[in-house]
Amino acid sequence: MDWRKLKPEERVNAAIGMVDLVTSISAENERVKHPKISEQALISRLRHRFQILKVTTEAERAAIDRADIKSILENTSINLRLLRKRAKTQKTIKLLDDLLAQLA
């Protein structure tokens, strides 16, 4: 998938998919670190980590999602192999590769 060739709506959907993916991986990591964590505490930790954002326009949201994903990748311990596998499944591997290249 070439990020530049996507329609704006497709970009937003891809970014949201990546945020969902990274969020689920982050939640899994929190559960491994804190096996007895309650659902409410988990949500609180994730909200704190990601600093839930205000409602924005689609273009703003796409840019923010991209920045969020980069921040999560920089500041969260993740299983990159698992992330790449899921990104391939969700057809967002090009987006992930672009973001990882920007971090390098």
Image (cartoon, rainbow, N blue to C red):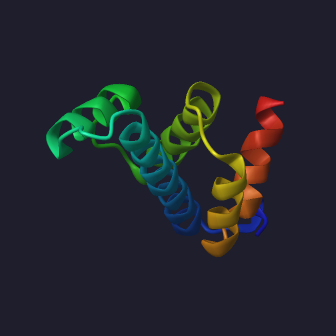
In the image, taking residue 72 as reference, residue 4 lies left or right, namely right
In the image, taking residue 87 as reference, residue 57 lies left or right, namely left
Furthest toward the front, the residue is 35
Task: Locate the C terminus by quadrant.
Answer: top right
Q: Where in the figure is residue 68, as x and y percent of width and height?
A: 52, 36
The residue under the point 51% across, 66% down is 9
Q: 47 or 58, which is in the foreground?
A: 47
Q: Where in the figure is residue 16, as x and y percent of width and height?
A: 47, 57
The residue under the point 55% across, 55% down is 18
Q: 82 or 71, which is in the foreground?
A: 82
Dividing the picture into quadrants, the one containing residue 30 is top left
The residue under the point 60% across, 40% down is 78
The residue under the point 64% across, 28% down is 74
As drawn, 8 above or below 71? below
Question: Would residue 53 be seen by someone viewing this image from the given angle?
Answer: no
Q: Where in the figure is residue 60, as x and y percent of width and height?
A: 46, 42
Dividing the picture into quadrants, the one containing residue 10 is bottom right
Q: 44 or 100, which is in the foreground?
A: 44
Please tell me how many numbered marks the rendered image carries.
0
As drawn, 102 above or below 16? above
Question: Would residue 2 be seen by someone viewing this image from the given angle?
Answer: yes
As drawn, 66 above or below 48? below
Q: Where in the figure is residue 41, as x and y percent of width and height?
A: 19, 34
Task: Locate the N terminus by quadrant.
Answer: bottom right
Q: 34 or 89, which is in the foreground?
A: 34
